[in-house]
Image (cartoon, grey):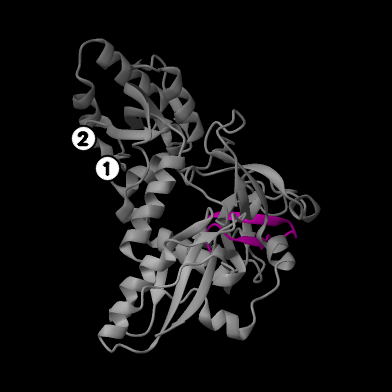
Amino acid sequence: MLRFLATFLSVALLAGGALARGGGAPIIIFIPGGGPLPPEGNTCIPEGVGSGKETESWNGIRVLARGIHGIDTKRCPDPAFPVLATATGLATQEVRSAPSSQCVPYGSAAGDEVAIDQYGVAKILSVMSVTSKCQVGAEAMVISLEAHRAATPAASPETASTRGSREPTDAEMQKEYERLVASAAPVKEYRVRHILVRTKEEAVAAIEEIRGGKDFAEVAARVSLDPGSRINGGDLGWNTASSFDPDFSKAMVRLDPEGLSQQPTKTPFGWHVIELLASKIGKDSFPPLASVKQRIAERLKSAQASELRVPAKAVCRQMVTPDVSAAASGGIKGTVVAEMRVENGKVAEVVSLTGPSALHPMVTEALLKYGCDRLDRPVLATQSFEF
């Protein structure tokens, strides 16, 4: 399982906001007045914009905010754009208003909303099978969220009030998690340790000490400026290449399958001595359910809200009548309203039942025998039963 860096500070020192970025562009400092925004750089944006959101920068360029540094009146003197942020410039609205192929994070699914560097916030239309286009992430057909919303009629007040209100069950979230894990392509992970110092000379000296016989962990504990990994002898655990600063990542990957760097590596945080301990390929880098449970719940509720609801007779041609003998002999009367999910030509799940609970087993038994149309997407169907 993917191990997080020893402390949040370690992540800040190395990832620099690059986690799962997949781009690899160097960080460029951008000072207002210096021209258009580069592929990635610092710019001034309005207050209240969160990371991962689109906005206009001070010079009218549409950007995707990736890191919010806070109000900086010296570098951002315009009161309408007082916040300094790391951001990426976006493709034109014309480009983003039509579906296109983009790289998205592993585990993404159709219907998800994701933030993509140099593209913006997008709605995933479909995820493709494993391709060679995306070294980090999966290839998917997407369209800008703005364009998707413009093309999708808003739900009526009556529909909005009845859709998406049910909280997903633990079983539903477990099933969705297992589906995401199964769809994730295997990724390569690296176990690496490092020593962070201020100057190249200090880094070269540390390399010479280690080559001379000193233990790497001992040198790291003595001179490294990264307090999170220093207490572990510089060990950063298992991580994917995209978890690190691009320059750090490139130097680490060159050492594969293992080895000590012979030259130090410079990143925006200082100079690094890098040692790759091991590498592996597998799916165990997928985060544990507990850490993504809330996101999965939101995904399922969103899917529920967008699912089509139809009468069962509109999609199921072979319907089975519940066995009412037990109900009649017990004198049980009432109305049962069933909501079911129809998928792959059958009732895949009975979502909810109302009415006398004693009637629920016989209704469920009948519903699971239905023969339905094979549709291009799951639908929610409803049916009433009188006893």
Q: Is 259 rendered above or below residue 246?
A: above
From which residue to which does the magenta span run?
A: 50-68
Graded by Cα atoms within 10 Å as few (under 14), some (14 to 19) or many (20 or more), the crowding at tag 2 reads some
At horizontal 64% and vertical 77% (from top left) the residue drawn is: 155
Q: Position of residue 209 (x, y in %)?
A: 26, 16
Q: Amino acid at mark 1?
A: Ala
**Residue closer to the observer: 268 or 94:** 94
At horizontal 32% and vertical 28% (from top left) the residue drawn is: 191
Viewer can see residue 73: no
Q: Of the numbered discs in the image, which one, if any, rests on residue 232?
A: 2
**Residue closer to the observer: 206 or 123:** 123
Q: Is 371 rendered above or below residue 214?
A: below
Residue 66 lies in the magenta-colored region:
yes
Q: Is 59 rendered above or below residue 139?
A: below
Q: Amino acid at mark 2?
A: Asn
Q: Name the residue furthest top.
A: 212
**Residue closer to the observer: 88 or 13:** 88
Query: Quick check: 268 left or right of 157?
Result: left
